[in-house]
Image (cartoon, rainbow, N blue to C red):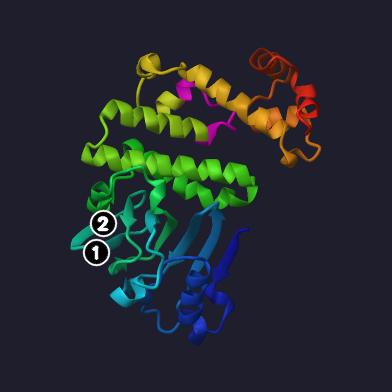
Amino acid sequence: MVMTFDTRQVPAKSRPAYWEHSAAVSGLPPLRGRHDQDGRFSARLTTGTLGAITIAEASIPAGECWRTPTMGRQFAEDTYQLQVIVGGEVLAEQRGRQTRLRADDAILVDPTQPIRFINTPATSVSIVFPRRSLRLTPDHLITSVGVRIPGDRGAGALLSSLARGLVRTLDDLSPDGSLRVGGALLDVLGVALAARTGEAPPHAALIQTIYAFIDANLPDRRLSPASIAAAHHISVRQLHKLFEGEPLTVTARIRNSRLENCRRDLSSDARRGRTVASIAASWGMPDPANFSRLFRSAYGMPPSGFGKTTGG
């Protein structure tokens, strides 16, 4: 469920306390702030969850906020926070690193450690997630905290795009869809961090970025080798060459992933009377006849009988 908190809903003198309370009940790391607006502090927070991941978009006035060591110890030790800037500029300081962030840039934050932000009027997306979700070495994660992830190229650009669109789509995602989108987002974050330090070779990093992009965009019927190549600033020929050593071609990967999601939905309790055509269309396969043919070829039976056979 998506919740929205707006300080304009309460008297001016109560707004700073209301804002801190709103962030706390949303599952965000604690911060204290100083914003000079002549007593007219105005901020807005929209928040929701993707499984174990907390998502929040905040719009705040110019000012400064910080977290002390005591405040950090109050937060869960097994989490990290990704901060993606939507608009404005932010100066972040953590672990002796000072980083200037502009629109689309991101930064990995340790929510248990002291931090300081100085910002112009800004909007940002915060994503709080379990540390174990990032399949990177502890040393690599430590060196990644407080370092700018550029949002204008490579995996950083894809990460920024995914994060900025999450809040607006939370209510439209099924529980299973939420888990998949959350996983795709963290996969892209892992690729962005690995590519920044060279922990993963460029070829492998790009392949993993493309896989995450495909998984996140399966419902879009326009998803194709051409659109994937354009999103990653490579040619279609380069894209196909990247997949020469993979188990499936890029086209087969899209098709098989869509079919598997349809198969799961057809046999799931979440189907709730949805038609075969509507399920297929929700995964980017709007042509019923073509979908039926592909489904029968993959699973040996028509989709119309699949749920009944499996007890759905």
Image coords of residue 275 (percent x, y): 79, 31
- The residue type indicated by label 1 comes to Glu
Image point (47%, 25%), residue name = 227
Image coords of residue 140 (percent x, y): 25, 47
Q: Secondary structure at mark 1?
A: strand
Stretch in magenta = 216-227
Seen from the viewer's position, the closer of residues 105 and 208 is 208
Q: Is residue 68 visible?
A: no
Whole-angstrom CA distance, mark 1 to mark 2, is 7 Å
Task: Check whether the beta carbons of the residues at disc 1 and disc 2 lie within 8 A of each other.
Answer: yes
Image coords of residue 68 (percent x, y): 30, 75
Seen from the viewer's position, the closer of residues 192 and 124 is 192
Image coords of residue 76 (percent x, y): 41, 65
- The residue type indicated by label 2 comes to Gly
Image point (38%, 14%), residue name = 244
Q: Secondary structure at mark 2?
A: loop
Query: Residue tagged by mark 2?
Result: 146
Q: Is residue 235 left or right of residue 213?
A: left
Q: Tell whether position 307 is magenta.
A: no
Query: Residue tagged by mark 1?
Result: 93
Image point (25%, 53%), residue name = 142
Q: Vertical placement of 284 versus 3: above or below?
A: above
Q: Is residue 201 left or right of residue 177?
A: left
Dot 1 or dot 2: first in sequence order is 1
